[in-house]
Image: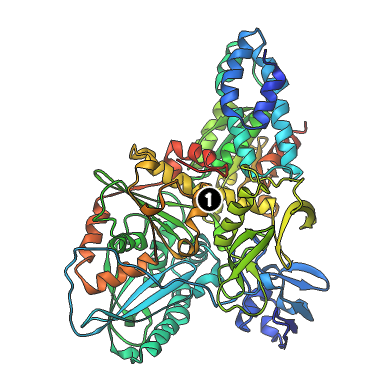
Amino acid sequence: MEIFTPDGRRHQREVPPAAVRLPLSSWLEGEHLPLNTRCGERGLCRGCLVRVDGRMLRACQAEAGAFETVSIPDASFRDNRLNGVSSFEIGTHRYALRTRPGIGLALDIGTTTVAGALWNLADGTCLAHASAANEQRRFGDNVLSRIDHAVGLGGASPALQSALVKDTLEPLIHTLCAAASIDPARITEAVAAGNTVMLHGFAGARLSGFAAYPFRPEFLGRRTLRSRDLGFTPDFPVFLGASPGPFVGADITLGALASGILEEDAPALLVDFGTNGEILLKTGDGYLATATAAGPAFEGGRLNCGAIAGKGVISSMALRGGEWKVTLAGELSGRITGISGAAYVDFIAEALRAGILNRMGRFDTDHPAVERAEVDGEMQRCVKVCGPLFVSEADVAELIQAKAAIAAGVMTLLELAETRPGELRTVYIAGGFGYHLNCAHAMAVGMLPDVPAERLHVIGNASLGGASLVLQSDAGSAADTLCGNCRVVELNQIDCFEDHFIDCMPLERIS
Amino acid sequence: MSTIEDLKTAVINGRRKDVKTLVPELLESGIEPSALLSQALIPAMGVVGERFKNNEIFVPEMLVSARAMKEAMNVLEPKLLEAGIRPEHTALIGTVEGDLHDIGKNLVATMWKGAGFDVIDLGVNVPAARFIEAIEEHKPHIVGLSALLTTTMPAMRDTVAAIREAGHTSVKLLVGGAPITQSYANEIGADGYSRDAASAVDAAKEALGV
């Protein structure tokens, strides 16, 4: 087969007889030409569209042996150089440091990206930190598709565990150790944060308990594993952080430790923007936590030009004198391939300010920037950003639903705590998406409630920061206390959630 | 003075607060509840559905309109019942067992009400036995099953099978939800499928042959 990749290269590969019936996307994966199989090869998304004989088809629904020539468009090619975040801040805390000889590894296992930091435990110095794409993405871009995959195999998936341990974490550990000039065999212990589904997949536990309500995860409390049992070559203990609930994970508990929210006066809010939005509200008498399904829009899913922030992807944009000024993630070279979720938020805020867009997400048809163009065979109102990239009204509608899900999650917790947004003393924004987000824009479009800038803190990968803190101090027990003191809210079971969701639809400030 | 047309416009534009004052005001002026339903609400939701299908509006605006419609129905439904007015067709709707998502299902319920159906909403996480019980109680013409998770699609399949096995072979079963496709609907033996809330009305009418 002749395969053309977006960089203009031509690859000649033989499809062996045993592979002719394989889905084209699976075979390409094995040939190191991975596609964006966002839905986990179920034919539900458009992530793996390839061009064959002048028409586009889903590679996951086609057989590898059926074609002579296939060309992979930009949007379908899975680029592994993601713009993950391994930077973090650790707020003031009152944990006793435990200095001792050894090299510690802190890990944050996210659905889309993983991040790690290597620490000298003797003096508490960070030797290296880095992030990488979670190779489990080939089973789908969200936790649900991973759960579905595992359930199909009876509950636990060795392939899922191996994609994480062998294909993701081992290379990451080698990168970290190389940067710090340390032999991986010298690692003495590790602490891992992550959402509950990722930690289950990491431990090789069954994911069946996440498939349907009532949710019954195999474990929530902290536990200690041996790296050898997980499939790593060097052997050391691996501590998994405690999670408050089935879909509210150790990433938010350990993130809370790093943020400093535990020491802060109530009411205070921590929003961890990842592939899922997790929200923790500190109230006068405890904590409320929830996870809100913003959907894949902020990772670029379901958007015409959407992409996960990575090389060649627009990471921010601004409207200046009628022109879109864009900033690219990674190096400033080569092609511009897509628009990141954070840049879409910039677009909406700027278009709203300029009157191109109204509060219900409709473009002003009299505005010179608005044109009608054919998208997927249907005429839609669009605004061109640069090159072939554009934003359509359908894209804006997807983003409105995503931002409303987050805002409604926050507003529901605030209502349960009988607190008004203006009363929030501190708001922490954590997570990879949050790190790249322009918070002023997020407030202008009503994704976050309005708070004065001085109360807002962008703290980066708090989950990795928290894992690092647990590694070096006695903070681990504080995470357990937090879990015990935390009411986990399932938004779908709260009556006011739907009302908040609809109230948060308009693109306007929330106060 | 406000008119029926004002109410229709308020629902189309999703102005819930206006709807809240308009409905009692129009009723006070002597207009029959059934006239408000047939001349304002049903045509309004027809316009909303049509605009959605033509890509003129998207889900956010439809949700806002549907909530305005719901506001009006909260006042009208008891009055219609009092007047002994019963819609011609009855629909049951619910999200299948294990699934707690209801925003899409609620939207379909409102669109069906907007098409003049009597809609009984069983809520979320509805076991097959509960569907069967409600079918026997309400004798609906159509039953809508919703699933938003790929992991709860098997529960949808099981529910369809259980309803048929219980001997309810003539009731029309319609399925929908983000991961559901026409081919899945065919595979599990549903009578109809709709990809979104606006076409759920067409799917229901088609299944009923009206």
Left or right of B123, for residue A382:
right
Q: Amino acid at mark 1?
A: Lys
Question: Is A254 placed left or right of B59 in the picture?
Answer: left
Q: Is residue A461 left or right of residue B35?
A: left
Residue A382: percent from left, percent from top: 73, 54
Q: Residue at x 65, y 43 (%)?
A: A358
Where is residue A98 shown, x and y percent of the image?
A: 17, 75
Which quadrant of the view contains residue A235? Answer: bottom left
Q: Nearer the viewer, residue A108 or B186?
A: A108
Vertical placement of A276 versus B161: above or below? below
* Residue position marked by numbered label 1 in the rendering: A403
Q: Quadrant of the C terminus of chain A?
A: top left
The quarter of the picture where residue A350 lies is bottom right
Total residue callouts: 1
The quadrant in which residue A462 appears is bottom left
Helix, strand or loop for disc 1:
helix
Residue closer to the observer: B81 or A181: A181
Q: Describe the colour scheme in one phrase.
A: rainbow
Q: Going by the picture, which residue comes out furthest to the right?
A: A53
